[in-house]
Amino acid sequence: MRRAPSTGAPMPSSGPFQRLPPLVVALALGLVAVEALLQLGAHGLIGGPQAAGWRIEAMTRFGFSAPLFDYMVETRRPTTEALTRFVTYPAVHSGAMHAIFGAVLLLALGKAVAERFSQVATAGILLAGSIAGALAYGLSLDSRVLLVGAYPGVYGLIGAFSWWLFTASDSAARGRIAAFRLIGVLAGLQLLFRLLVGGGDEWVAHLAGFATGFALAPLLAPDGGARLRRWRDRARQR
């Protein structure tokens, strides 16, 4: 690990994929494994003729369904099927490129966040971002399009990393604004992609994931416990 020239403090390794945290690697390999299985089935290499429909079946079974969520809210009857979709939909993607980009972003951002927080915190941000993304998707949209993919959780990592950049930068406005450069670039690319080839309303889930990661970051940071105590003391003094 490199050290800062001025202070000698440890610095994260250079390069996006050096010394990848085992947990992040395991999660990314899980995404790749699921996609590889679906691809092999689609090309008739495993599973027989019925394997051609595995992707649709997986999306239908594990994707987050807004109508199913609405029904659960209206009837006030939470079911295991509806609740488990909050955490299963990130494992299934709409195609190979969708899955590959998701895995690559997970590796790069998972490494960046784990180095600055911890592997446990990284997993928590991923999970919370995924759940918040699905919740926002179900509450704000009346869409029958299933929500799939790891992106809401990945955007949660972007939120946490942006918070770290925001707090690590100096007080100059330029340094603060630069902390949100990554989310701005990704949002712009997503908008351009939607204008060129069309797309759904997944951006709602992505935005919710980002906001969740940004909000949780100060609590899950290495000094999160001390930060909470300071907030508590300030609240008592009022």
Image (cartoon, grey):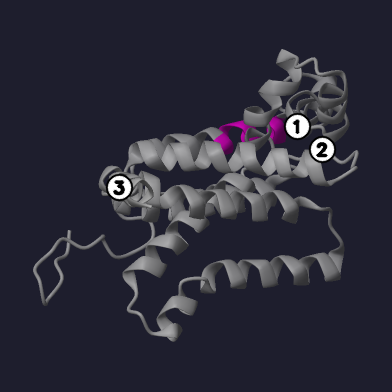
Q: How many labels sit on residues?
A: 3
* Mark 2 to mark 1 CA distance (whole Å): 6 Å
Instruction: Find disc 1 in the rendering and name its residue.
Output: 63
Name the mark on residue 233. Answer: 3
Q: Residue at x 62, y 31 (%)?
A: 34
Name the mark on residue 146. Answer: 2
What secondary structure characterizes most of the magenta part?
helix
Residue 53 falls inside the magenta stretch? no
Query: Which amino acid, by three-letter code, is at mark 3?
Result: Asp
Q: Check the image and report above or below for 33 versus 188.
A: above
Label located before the other in sequence (2 or 1) = 1
Asked if residue 226 shows in the view, the reply is: yes
Please tell me how crowded label 1 is: few (under 14), some (14-19), or many (20+) other residues with Cα within 10 Å: many
Where residue 219 appears, as percent x and y from the top left, is 38, 46
Q: For mark 3, give the secondary structure.
A: helix
Where residue 126 appears, as percent x and y from the top left, is 51, 41
Q: Residue at x 48, y 36 (%)?
A: 27
Name the mark on residue 175. Answer: none
